[in-house]
Image (tube, helix red, strand yellow):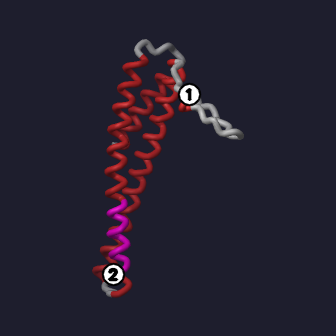
Amino acid sequence: MGKKLKAYILSLQKLLESNTDIPDIDSLKSELLTEIQFWQHERLIHLLVTILFALLTMSVFIVLLFYRELSVLILLAALLALMIPYIRHYYILENGVQTLYTFYEELTKRQKKLPESCIPTLKGVKIKPLPK
């Protein structure tokens, strides 16, 4: 999943960095919104799995405090070793979806149809431009 998301992000990044006019920006934005929805769903599922897996790991740790057996220690070590890839994968999904949000905002700016609700009204808040 991470490779697919990275490939999609790279293709969008190349398109946006080319600084050429995008002929059908509405359909590209619609496709991007659909992709964002799919990736948000994927991110939610992996968040729930990661939370449940962390709870299981903590439960095994608590069991280890009361029953000091080698089998429980081995189970805890295996669960801790698996937590690293779970957290890494969720991190990739989270950052990828955030990047897709910035691409959507960039397409909206290019389309010159940025709604007023997207412009913050707080005094003293400075918005950094998107990296090019």
Is residue 52 on the magenta stretch?
yes
Q: Is residue 128 magenta?
A: no
Q: Quadrant of residue 26?
A: top left
Residue holding disc 1 = 116
- Position of 40 relative to 110 (above/below): below
Q: Amino acid at mark 1?
A: Glu
Q: Are marks 1 and 2 in contact (CB under 8 Å)?
A: no
| C-alpha separation, residue under disc 1 versus residue under disc 2 | 54 Å
Residue at image coords 47%, 44%: 95
Q: Magenta span covers which residues?
A: 51-63
**Is residue 38 toward the left or the right of residue 105 in the image?**
left
- Find the residue positioned furthest to the right: 124
Residue at 33% x, 44% y: name it: 41
Q: Residues within 10 Å of mark 2 (few under 14, many from 20)?
A: some
Query: Considering depth in this image, is 74 or 83 the residue closer to the camera?
Result: 83
Q: What residue would you read off at disc 2?
A: 63
Task: Considering the whole magenta stretch, tell me its main secondary structure.
Answer: helix
